[in-house]
Image: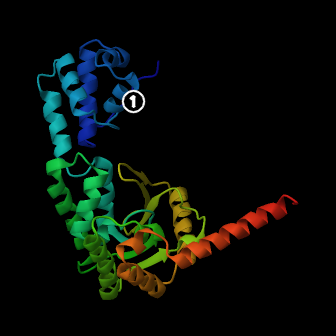
Amino acid sequence: MPAPKELDASASLPALYGVKLRKLRMRAGLTQRQLGDKIPIAHSRIAQFELGKEVPPEDVNAKLDVLLGAEGDLADLWGHIKRTPYPDWARTYMALEQQARKVEKYMAHTVPGLLQTEAYARALLSVARPSVGLQLGRMLEARMRRQDVLTRHDPPVLWVILDEAVLRRPVGDVATFREQLAHILRVTGERDHVTVQVLPFERGEHPLLGGSLTVLSLSNRSGVAYMESSHSGELVESAEAVAEYALALDHLRAQALPPGQSADLIQAVMEESPRDSRLPTRSQRRKLAQVQLQQHAGRRLRRGR
């Protein structure tokens, strides 16, 4: 059996929790499977806890504390982790974001944090993390504070490509969403170092259909890429992989509307009625029907019918 992977307890609070949990389990003379059976949960979850890759739910942590005779130590450590506004992987990214000279983004579903209004961020965080509870205020404060990077004396270049879906799926009520769109236009109009493009639906498939991406260019080290979803993120540091992601963003920039036309589209969406922002217009439905008819005819030709 291979030796267990060593974990640096100083790397993060989840890592410290994992090291502590492993020591307590081994002191109790239990295997991961035996401990998992006592809770009960899959032993693979115990392994994830010990590697610092996952933090147990509150009820599971309480059982671990009792079963391993931690005398409240695991409960206290769990509380510190949950009081932290952002998980470790997000904090690592945000620290690098503050050091970047260029921040390039493709956003598949939402406005990026650096351009969010407080009301939009509040609505988004409340849905993305329903259990946020009392942490919401702290998370909002942290997110708004990140935006200071755009107004400092040496701000990074921020280049954002918004999928049209970002404009077509309202977040919050009508006033919140319109305020958010107006904020994007105001920021891009006032700050030369901020550029926003919109990638229209009609452009079809592209290299980043899998999700949102950020590429950071840094002065003191090689660039990094960051893939994110609402509940997780992955920091990519391989030079080869980062170059591939940067190339994908170049392709999207070429396909997206120019900044001026993008601003016109954002303005048009902002002025639409709430119904229009959620449902396609008559002309859009007619255009979609024509595209589908052409696609159907093309398939019949390819099949020799």
- Residue at the far right in the pictured view: 304
Residue at left offset 20%, top offset 57%? 139
- Residue at the far front in the pictured view: 282
Q: Quadrant of residue 20?
A: top left
Disc 1 crowd, CA 10 A, few/some/many (<14, 14-19, 20+): few
Q: Nearer the viewer, residue 175 or 286?
A: 286
Image position, residue 147 (x, y; %):
25, 70
Q: Nearer the viewer, residue 154 or 268?
A: 268
In the depicted structure, whether residue 89 falls above or below residue 71:
below
Residue at left offset 55%, top offset 75%? 284
Q: Nearer the viewer, residue 77 or 283?
A: 283
In this picture, residue 197 sits left or right of residue 123: right
Q: Secondary structure at mark 1?
A: loop
Residue at left offset 21%, top offset 17%? 67
Q: Which residue position holds label 1?
A: 5
Q: Nearer the viewer, residue 294 or 47?
A: 294
In the depicted structure, whether residue 239 falls above or below residue 59:
below
Image position, residue 252 (x, y; %):
54, 71
